[in-house]
Amino acid sequence: MRLIVVFLSILASASAFAVNRIPSRVATRLQGQIPEEMMGPEQLEIKKIQEKWKEAKFMSQEEAEAKLDPEYLAAYNRYYEDWDKGIEKMTEIATYLDKQLNPPKVQKKSKKQKKRDKWAKVQAREAARAARLAGPKSTE
């Protein structure tokens, strides 16, 4: 009995550090379609609608207005309105992110510009000091 417990504990501890196998990606039956012979009348109707929408989705606007009946034309217009709204929204997000990720770069000041700025600061400080020493002028 003890031997079985020891053996099982060794087995459990060894398998705890084993490398897990990665399952291969195999297509499931859910990704496929049922053969037409096995489909019921409702499923066949859905398949016809799918086929018609596949054709309608890739038509140009003029071609869709000429060929599609009103129900499919309304669905076509809704689809491409949503598509355009999504594209506009993604464009806005992309421009916003571009501004955040790539901010505009400020040019480095040249050596002469640094000297000019320093001289302007000194002149402003001297002017403020002279104004403070002169004090308020009285008109007596």
Image (tube, rainbow, N blue to C red):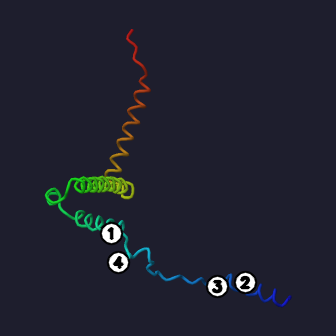
What residue would you read off at disc 4? Answer: 37
What residue would you read off at disc 3? Answer: 18
Mark earlier in primary sequence (4, 2): 2
Q: Callout 2, which amino acid? A: Ala
How far, Cα to Cα, is label 1 from label 4?
Answer: 10 Å
What residue would you read off at disc 1? Answer: 44
Instruction: Between label 1 and label 2, give the one nearer the viewer.
Output: 1
Q: Which mark is residue 83?
A: none
Label 1: few (<14), some (14–19) or many (≥20) C-alpha neighbours in 10 Å = some
What residue would you read off at disc 2? Answer: 12
Q: Callout 3, which amino acid? A: Ala
How far, Cα to Cα, is label 4 from label 3?
Answer: 47 Å
Mark earlier in primary sequence (1, 3): 3
Where is residue 63 drawn, in percent x and y?
14, 60
Q: Callout 4, which amino acid? A: Glu
Q: Callout 1, which amino acid? A: Leu
In the foreground, 12 or 97? 12
Mark 2 near mark 3, Cβ–Cβ under 8 Å? no
Image quadrant occupied by the N terminus: bottom right
Instruction: Between label 4 and label 2, give the one nearer the viewer.
Output: 4
How far, Cα to Cα, is label 2 from label 3?
Answer: 10 Å
Mark 4 near mark 2, Cβ–Cβ under 8 Å? no
Mark earlier in primary sequence (1, 2): 2
- Residue at 28%, 67% (x, y): give it: 48
